[in-house]
Image: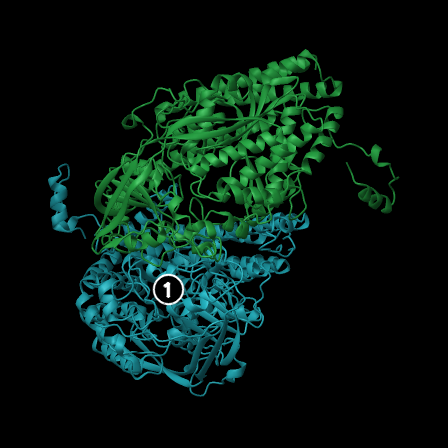
Chain colours: A green, B cyan
Amino acid sequence: MMSRLNLSMLAALGGLSLVPARFAPDPAPLRGFTAATSRVEREWESKFDAVPDPARMRANLELLSARPHHVGSPYDLQNAQWILAQYKSYGWDAHIETFDVLFPTPKERLVELVAPTHYKAKLQEPPVPGDPTSGQTAEQLPTYNAYSADGDVTGPLVFVNYGVPADYDELARHGISVKGAIVIAKYGGSWRGIKPKVAAEHGAIGCLIYSDPADDGYAGGSVFPKGPMRPSQGVQRGSVEDMPTYPGDPLTPGVGATKDAKRLPVSESPVLTKIPVLPISYGDAQPLLEAMGGPVAPSAWRGGLPITYRLGAGPARVHLVVKSNWDLKPIHDVIARLPGTSEADQWIIRGNHHDGWVNGAADPLSGQVAELEEARAMGELYKQGWRPKRTIIYAAWDGEEPGLLGSTEWAEEHAQELEQHAVAYINTDGNGRGFFHASGSHSLEAFVNEAEKDVTDPETHASVWKRAKAQEAVRAAESGRSAAGGPTSDIRIGALGSGSDYTPFLQHLGIASLNLGFGGEDQGGVYHSIYDDFYWYTHFSDTSFVYGRALAQTAGRMVMRLADADVLPFVYTNLAQTVQRYTSELEQLRDQRARQIDAENGAIRAGDFALASDPRDPTSAPALEVPPPQFNFAPLLNAVDTLNAAAVTFEKSYNSWLAAGDTATAALRGANEELLKSERDLTSPDGLPRRPWYKHLLYAPGFYTGYGVKTMPGAREAIEQGEWGDVNAQIARIADALRAEAALVNGAAATLHGGN
Amino acid sequence: MMSRLNLSMLAALGGLSLVPARFAPDPAPLRGFTAATSRVEREWESKFDAVPDPARMRANLELLSARPHHVGSPYDLQNAQWILAQYKSYGWDAHIETFDVLFPTPKERLVELVAPTHYKAKLQEPPVPGDPTSGQTAEQLPTYNAYSADGDVTGPLVFVNYGVPADYDELARHGISVKGAIVIAKYGGSWRGIKPKVAAEHGAIGCLIYSDPADDGYAGGSVFPKGPMRPSQGVQRGSVEDMPTYPGDPLTPGVGATKDAKRLPVSESPVLTKIPVLPISYGDAQPLLEAMGGPVAPSAWRGGLPITYRLGAGPARVHLVVKSNWDLKPIHDVIARLPGTSEADQWIIRGNHHDGWVNGAADPLSGQVAELEEARAMGELYKQGWRPKRTIIYAAWDGEEPGLLGSTEWAEEHAQELEQHAVAYINTDGNGRGFFHASGSHSLEAFVNEAEKDVTDPETHASVWKRAKAQEAVRAAESGRSAAGGPTSDIRIGALGSGSDYTPFLQHLGIASLNLGFGGEDQGGVYHSIYDDFYWYTHFSDTSFVYGRALAQTAGRMVMRLADADVLPFVYTNLAQTVQRYTSELEQLRDQRARQIDAENGAIRAGDFALASDPRDPTSAPALEVPPPQFNFAPLLNAVDTLNAAAVTFEKSYNSWLAAGDTATAALRGANEELLKSERDLTSPDGLPRRPWYKHLLYAPGFYTGYGVKTMPGAREAIEQGEWGDVNAQIARIADALRAEAALVNGAAATLHGGN
């Protein structure tokens, strides 16, 4: 509602009659609400907005990050119990669900250069004076990569850049094999778990991963504690479970890791690495890299150390030892419920994990404290009489860091109920400072944009939508073009790969999902280190917790709207436009691959690579590749058209419903029951090639990139990897899903307002 | 002629009858020659090819680089006299021409950090054990930039990236002014003289230029003496004369700097810097850069030092002192002549400088020793009875390093004769190892390609043409496209900006010119340092001088063909295609600027830049710019069509002449006299805007980039710099020149074989 001050100002400008505040024209009704229900919803929202409190977030962050709280630690359990108590105090129905998961912790770690000189890596992050929690050495998990194979290996060192498949192609052109070697890869360029996986596929016997200072060290700013960036001995811990195959407990794929679940023997889990792997600091990496010989690394591979980066192999030889305790550990998910009324069997789920690698202030607690404030605010509203139509479930997941354990086991354990009842899952993880960003299901794209417009950016006082839109326009202008879609079009949300707890909901169960957060003005280099703590966060990130409040206002608002809407606020035109774009991308990808293979094969056959090679630093030609045939995109193109038509039909039906304004009909209930399942139709029970756990046909983490998303992954990865024979079948599967989706949307349109 | 061995091999493959060698089919006649004269020319060429001797080049390089030989040094004169004696011993008519030029040398140099800590820069390259000439400290020119203004200044330090105008726009967006400051710029990204020029335009009071290790230091390989790259204390000397305004003696623009030439007072020369400038090593730069504060530099600005690059201004404050002796010094050009016969008044000119910044082994002597071997070989041929039709002039220029002094003064002094007689100028400078590259007048593009096909690459034994073509194909394939033009099309030669002695010939006098050399497999970081010496060259570059021989074979062959051709071998279809491409580029440049300005102005007016700025590290919007109107490209497009038609007509006429095979007609002589002047028609007596010394309308060094070429510079720079009101007039001037060129080419076609 417009404030009196603003109305007076408008009046003072002349030409406007002074309308009493209570007759000020309402904004357009919220999606899914009638004019009347929208008015009520907005009133509750403005009450909601006033509750989340930066001071409480700060206090909660300090408390929750006071000690290391990784899986299996005493403080992890203590945090879960404290969170549980909070929910109860907010008036929620809450409990802890416990699972028993494989969680190896290090028993022995060694990295030493044994030739041509000797250097023993420190593998230890030093405490920083003035930063109290950095000195909690006894409780800190050592620097390591969880789910690394045990091993004791010695071999020549090879530098593999980011360690993705194309890097090995480049090495091969220099005549360098990693067979029997230990590779050293930079963090970045792919999810870390890809690095030992690809290294092992190429015959390496060990893998080191280090944080190059060009990526998150001194190149980007002063290092901790003077600035936010990674100091010389800072190490990024992290999981190397093969999550693109499946996340969650490595021993219980597809089912909840309950006490008596059937478990794979550790030796048979397909998601543990095949070779030992350890993360190291750039302080430890420099002596190893400096000792290397061989060709100078291509310029794109070089980092920020003051050395000549070389490929190897050798003369540097490294001895690497990794041994772990392969124990089961309990994880503690806190699950809280605010009951729905008329649609209590429809669930809106919201989550953020609570476990950290060490003190985990930014990751994940900065998101967790926002989530807690949302819950507290909803509890307040509940006390004031607010009754959500749908049931709201708030979760604080444990074990996200090792492999989305808490969310995955819970989603697997409750799969049947979730498939029946879940409307949407809204995830956050660590929160920062800057621009709002959202990724997820494109049927929620319009919904996200609408919510963003109603939240104020705390530093510029524009809406967070307007600020994100401005960033889009500036980026476009700086690269010499106008922003796509014009100044009022929806901001496109990204697609979800993996890397946080939405994965089991979206990609395993087909529940419409979102991942939200603020960032982009919170650069740092403490990710997964002992320095990601209260001191760092309150000096360098969202120091006054105003973006924490904005996140609570955004995510909480979305939860409330989903819970209260008369019609579930899915808009399929955005989805149809998105799949149309993905389809065009696939066609272009095919053509680009064809051009590239044609040009390369031509140059190979003409002997051009041989002739262009430097005799003193020879490179061989790449391997000949089979050029792609034309693929049959017709089913997909037709399905996209069909979906688009259905989406338009649904919009007409929705508008007719809105005009009628009837909120308590059987038609409405029926339509919502159909809409609730619309994301399910984008999945296939058979899942993706080589990884049946992943069922979503539009979004998946890349098999060879990890967190990074591959959209329409079955077809896209077949094209990228040159598996030409598989492409048409994958296209057809996606087309089938889109046709089913179109049928569902048409059905829902008819149910909602058949006579439109 | 095909060797007997190869014929036997062909015969052994079957299917070919064994043709006696003397009946082997001749290759197609050389351009400009009939079948008969071509056969004779090829016979002389094969004799020529056998003479250039790597062992002599090595010995000559060792001798010429034995001591520092900069302008004014005893060894500079001694080298000139030795070269003169060589030419005489080869049978050439040779003499030395001397000019007196302004050549400042340092009297006082100081760079010290005075706040927040103290550091005094060493400004000294240390001798390297094992490298004998690096220890000739007493004779070495100190590290400095010639033609820097004298000054004694103190101010805060600002990091300006490469110091080009766009870098100052970026600084302005961060609220950073260089007014009253000393700037520190990286070498690279523009010619060095641009850096103090642009800094002074923005109000800076001093300028430091340093060699970043990411550019030519340890990032690219081991540093000298272990490898070829720039060591920590290595410094790039060099001229900062404002050569894009005019090169040559700063006091005698447009006329030869003879003893009694009229001279500007030093204080009135427009090509000296306005502020003091000194080059420094990265060893000296690191303490200064490390002491800086202010915003973190954009990622594209960062170099390879293990520090956080920051913009400043300050808190680092620097005290910079530069004082020079502003003396006139003599320079000694060696000019040698091999007389022509029937066309003695047509001159083919070939040059390479002999002065170096210090010992100058790679730059310039590696090219000089090839040129000497060409001259020796031509002397041998002359003794055996070869008599070139045209007069051949070989030059060894002095004073190239400070500002193309020797070539410019000679060209200015002999301007009238040269305009009358010069057919072409062929330049080389330092030579390396790898791929052949040529740049220059596009009427010689086909000629260059033809010659390249007849020279063998010494390491792969393919023709240097085929190897360069292979590199083109590989580069295209690696970026996913097929090479332009297909496998048999001419390799496009580059356009010439500046940076070596072709500039006065091509851009001041309008003489068709080429610049040739080998490189690309000879990485190094000793440019303009004491380490560019015999030791470095014979360890890291063309160590066996086989590319020196290949250069002599390529350049010498071109000189002989130009000197002996019946019809001067200009091919205007390549020129027409090139100007067509340049015209398209200008149209695209206009459209791209329009799009960019439109997008930026839109985002500025919408307040997007303000909203997207980080409140903790604010950047302002760029300034609004006036969008470009549509320009009238019609005259240029029409002129290109006209030139293209004329070029085709000339090719028909040439083919008719070739079929007739008549080599001694008045028509032929008349046509050659016209062709000789065809490059002159591409110039205008008024020269370019703001720099009338530059007369060529197609090629010039960029006013704000230096060495880098701007093609169609009048129009292109007007568009780049937003001087919209000037563009149409500049387009029209170029169109006029192209129409005149077309008329000349049509005339020559009619003269050569009017009845075709």
Q: Is residue B427 visible?
A: yes
The amino acid on which the numbered mark 1 sits, given as a three-letter code, is Arg
Return the residue nearer the eye: B336 or A678. Answer: A678
On what subunit does the disc labeled 1 rest? Answer: B
Question: Is A458 left or right of B235, judged from the image as shown?
Answer: right
Instruction: From the image, tell me which residue sits under label 1.
Output: B669
Along the line of sight, the residue nearer the viewer: B658 or A666? A666
SS at mark 1 in the image: helix
Quadrant assignment, res A329? top left
Residue B671's x, y, as percent?
A: 40, 61
Which quadrant of the figure has residue B482?
Answer: top left
Name above or below for residue B444 compared with residue B178. Answer: above
B698 or A85: nearer the eye? Answer: A85
**With respect to residue A194, does B511 lie above or below?**
below
Residue B69 is left or right of residue A425, and the answer is left
Q: Nearer the viewer, residue B173 or A718?
A: B173
